[in-house]
Image (spheres, coloured by chain):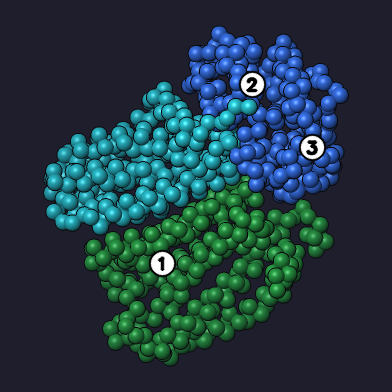
Chain colours: A blue, B green, C cyan
Amino acid sequence: MSSSALLETRDLSCNRNDRLLFEHLDFALEAGQMLVVEGPNGCGKTSLLRILTGLRMADGGEILWRGNPIDRLAGDYYEQVTYVGHHDGVKHELSCLENLRLARAMGMPSKTDLDDVLEQVNLYAYGETEVGSMSAGQKRRLALARLLATDSMLWILDEPFTSLDKASMSMFASLFEQHLQRQGIIVMTSHHDISLPTQSLQRLQLGAQA
Amino acid sequence: MFLWFHKLGSPPHFYRIAGKWIPWLSSIFLVLLLAGLYGGLIEAPPDYQQGDSYRIIFVHVPAAWMSLFIYVAMAFCGAVIIIWRMKLAEVVLISSAPIGASFTFLALATGSLWGKPMWGTYWVWDARLTSELILLFLYLGVIGLHNAIDDKRVASRAVAILTLVGVVNIPIIHYSVEWWHSLHQGATVTKFDKPSIHWSMLIPLLLMALAFQVYYVLALFQKCRVELLQRERNSKWVEEL
Amino acid sequence: MSQRLSLAQAFVFLLRRDLLLAMRNRAEYAMPLLFFVLVITLFPLALGALPELLARIAPGIIWVAALLAAMLSLDSIFRSDFDDGSLEQILLSAHPVAVLVLAKVSAHWLVTGLPLLLVAPLLAEMLGMPATAQPILLLTILIGTPILSLIGAIGVALTVGLRKGGIILSLLVLPLYVPVLIFAASATENAAMGFEVSAQIYMLLAFLFLSLSLSPWATAAALRMSAS
């Protein structure tokens, strides 16, 4: 294990419904690196991501952030993480701006103006629009806009490109690349065949074990 | 000593040890039960007020004690689950719940049977009976919640939280019901705590209490073994059995 | 690097968000209040509108109805957030979840418990409760309904992830509500008869402080369990 590893797992294992999904999982990510988790449906990709965020407890092993176990770091770890999971995590009765303001209040706010954030994800015109009236793709873009509204090093993304059209997909792919260039870290799963920066990329194959 | 405890916590080890103990526990239970019943039903003199119908306390009171004891034991397991996530604690908690519920039901049924010759009704809003009824609901809640969650490790966390919340509330509920009962001076089924209880009644009572304790451990071991097999069915040691 | 919001600011933010959501979902939040009135109306219909009888049992009826209305309203604390993923975001917050939970429960009480104060005097009159008892009735509702929200939140947190969570919620929560019911109804009854009520009120206050200090933690732990 490199001593400059920011995010590290050791001997991680996960059970679900009395079935072992994976065990003895080790990986390490340094600043500017990206991990893509791959594998068939039901092999534990989402579970792994949720364990990394702290939403789910691992059944064995540990996760270290800058060498410290994340369950001991608690709030200090969470402010470094932004998670976009299967659900968009936005309230349909609130406007885009109201949703982003809440996202900032929960975590570490970025210096970017919220209107600029919306601009970057092509939702500038929808600032005051109720999210419930937007399309699935637009809601997804708002969910991902959270990444720009907060200032965290670690992005954990579960199928981020769901419901997005090709143009949006490449727009976000370049946003991911910029994040890596700014020494951020990304852990993600994706069904989509998207061009990702290969030199800083690690691939993790689940479901090949057991 | 600590090493023994740690070993006991391992499922295959517990499975074997519990299996060895079961026949012994059965014998001890039967002996204690017969001794207690003999002492209570035959040896002890009739009560000067209630005649022979009071004898049901030899089942009612130990059952009530067990119903409370088991819930507290479950809460203890709950704490162990939350702090250490010990698998055996999870199994003990959920296996204890139906046993505790049964003792609660037994206490309610015997209390009810006692009430009939005394007051003419099968139910009396006595403080103890009302508290036992609420305790029964608490037990059913634990069983229901555990059943409703598919992933049994997550379910164990849920019932751990529930039993801890319950155990904090039990004294509060008990006190509130006592207070409520004292306002409306109704009939009391369990007025057995007189100033001094004669040893000829006390000894059978304690024997029955001990018998029920042994029964709890016996039933617990049996249920735990079954539950362990169910939970660990995909693991090596179960396949080797 | 920017600083995250202070805990107090995050608390206020979440509280305001939930109040805003309640305002935009007014119909959903009006139901428990209507249910409260409905249940109380059923009693004279079932028992006959005998003034002495109704006046005698009015405290009990009102409080049982308040309990049931509280039960009905509980689902709204976490259901919506759980379904759309907002709950996960709250759990992943840099701030202690127990405090954020308290913000949500406070909002819930403001929207569901406080309105009972407005309707209760009217219903007390309709049942013929003596006017001397009404201030105490309102006091018990003021102290009691936050306790119902706090304890109820634990139950909802445990069942929000279940498919038929609502059914088992009553089983989990109603036994825990019994102490509040006993002391609140007793206080109101005593007030109607001109007796002392301080013991009951102090007990209710004690319950309130106990649940304020313990239930947010239990609720946070239960939410983590439900979200995993």
Q: Nearer the viewer, residue C80 or B1?
A: B1
Residue under the point 83% across and 34% down: A205
* B73 up-or-down from C130: above or below: below
| Disc 1: which residue | B108
Residue under the point 34% across and 85% down: B196
| Disc 2: which residue | A148
Q: Nearer the viewer, residue A164 or B209?
A: A164
- Mark 1 element type: helix
Q: Amino acid at mark 2?
A: Leu
Image depth: mark 1 or mark 3 in front: 3
Q: Amino acid at mark 3?
A: Ala
Relative placement, left or right, of B111 versus A129 is left
| Disc 3: which residue | A5
Q: Are marks 1 and 3 on the same chain?
A: no
Q: Amino acid at mark 1?
A: Leu
- Quadrant of the rendered image containing residue C107: top left
Q: Position of residue A50 (x, y in %)?
A: 68, 37
Q: Position of residue C164 (x, y in %)?
A: 52, 40
- Quadrant of the rendered image containing residue B137: bottom left
N-term-proximal mark, 2 vs 3: 3
Q: Nearer the viewer, residue C153 or A62?
A: A62
Q: CA distance from mark 1 to mark 3?
A: 62 Å
